[in-house]
Amino acid sequence: MRIQSNKPLRTCLLTGALAITALPLASAAGNDRARDGDDRPGEDRLLPGNLLVSRTVYSNNPGIVKVGEVLPPDCAATTGGCSAPSGAPFDGTYPTVWNNDLYDASFGITSRIFLDELTPFGFPLRTIAVPAEPSEGTTAADHLVTSFPSKSELALNLSTDGRFITFVGYVAAPDTVDVSNSNTPGAIDTTNPVGTAFLRAVAQMDSRGHLQFTETNAYSGNNGRAAILNDSQGVDVYYTAGNAGNGGNPQPNGILLGAGAQIISPANLPESAQVPGVPTPVASFSVTELGAKADKLGKDDNFRGLTIFNNVLYFSKGSGSNGVNTVYFVDTAGSACPNGVGIPAAGAKLPTAPLAFNPATLATVGLPNNTCILAGFPSTPNKSAPTTAFPFGIWFADARTLYVADEGDGYTGGTDLYTHAAAQATAGLQKWVFDVQAAQWKLAYVINAGLGLGQPYQVHGYPSGNNAATGLPWAPATDGLRNITGRMDHDGTVFIWGITSTISGNGDTGADPNRLVVVIDQLKNADPSKATRDRFVTLRTARFAEALRGVSFTPGSDGSRN
């Protein structure tokens, strides 16, 4: 998004004068149909050009988990089995509840979703509470929650025409255990130790805060992470990113079909009337494209971030032992990357239909491959070399300038966790510039000044000292960046907003209170020595029992996308 003048914003950010640490809750919005985006008399509108930040709040109810409770839920009915018979060592009290992750590897608890509108320099304006209980929904009990410690969830993305934002969650009640690793009802894996099943759903919201939900059986055993609505030129589909599977190998067909990149048609019915069918993948990648030995089917598509630029769909992968941690694009032309690496073909179009596959070979060879690694980005499989890239959010400033958030390696292996985080050279915001002659992207520099990598910070009410369960400090420290969005001024000044990742001695670092930050860069600069003035400013720090997840511009913000 190009803006004519933003001198006050630039001045505030350069001086580092703003730090918003508390955002009061405002009135909740209903979940009326959001397809038309029409204004309605007497309703407040989210202002174009403002930020929207997704936030989740844990209820901090000790009774959610009982000490000695055997987990995961209904594990005895699965072939995956239960955790140790001694049961959960901690009750539901925050933050010690997350130490149960050391006992139950699938541990998580659902929590409410809030969408906070802020000015670009962090001033809070209002909050929209997503209905979290059937009784709160104004349309046939529609509701949605997230999993509180699941750090990869709740990315926000503007639709291709800028009228809507979208995100992904679970059709479940708050305070429900292990939903993030549950099956979906239409894709049951009996080897998954979590014996419960919950639908996932894409949420869509217009500028008036009207919400609609589209249920899916995708991401069984794991989580959906991001969604974008393609609503341009007569198209009306969601693209989503996520991961599937929490059981053994081989995985059922429903798990393979519900992994990675999906294409979903928006529903026009309330949740109670929806009957989602078999998942519909839109893209897939395999390390066999690079000449490497095949991984566990479906796990190369463990996607985290996604964006659309110039009619091309991009994904990032930044975790897991399979596949490649890198940036990908969907090759709808079919000829851009014969060896698994390339650049999008000129005139490429966005996909409009699910990926065709052979049902007879799905369980043995998986989905066909139509996804490529973006040339210049890492292309060595994770199993072949030490992993040093952890990409998450992606934002294009223009056709030759790409910003990639790297969340850091998440190391919490010893008392050196802070110094290890501080020493990371690629964590933070990476600036990539396209080399036309070489036909590939090159890393220009990494911006992390002001992020405070490895510098512990205090959160009011958070424990001091060490966590007895891990022997490491409770205090969180920034490890890198996850979701980002940006915009550019008419003179080439680029503003990037991001959500931080954390490390700490918490049993699950995804439950740490993290931060919203912003930095200024110059589009034309590719010289690392000239980027030394680029310095992040903290706009907001999550409070006790809060976590920040996604950042986008508000619906109606012309041309801004994360």
Image (spheres, rainbow, N blue to C red):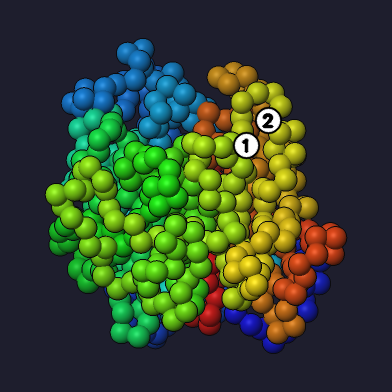
Check if mark 2's residue and mark 1's residue have beta carbons within 8 Å: yes
Q: Which mark is residue 503?
A: 1
**From this viewpoint, which residue is outermost toward the top?**
86
Quick one: quadrant of the N terminus? Answer: bottom right
Query: Residue at 29% across / 56% down in the picture?
Result: 368
- For label 2, the SS is helix
Q: Residue 356 carries which label?
A: none
C-alpha gap between disc 2 and disc 1: 7 Å
Between residues 506 and 93, which one lies in front from this camera angle?
Answer: 506
| Residue 534 in sight here | yes
Instruction: Pick whichever of labels 2 and 1 is earlier in the sequence.
Output: 2
In this picture, is 523 found above or below 464?
below
Residue of label 2: 417
| Label 2 environment density (alpha carbons within 10 Å; few <14, some 14–19, many ≥20) | many
Between residues 156 and 300, which one lies in front from this camera angle?
Answer: 300
Query: Residue at 35% across / 15% down in the picture?
Result: 84
Relative horizontal placement of residue 90, taking residue 418 as reference (left or right): left
Query: Residue at 84% across / 64% down in the picture?
Result: 530
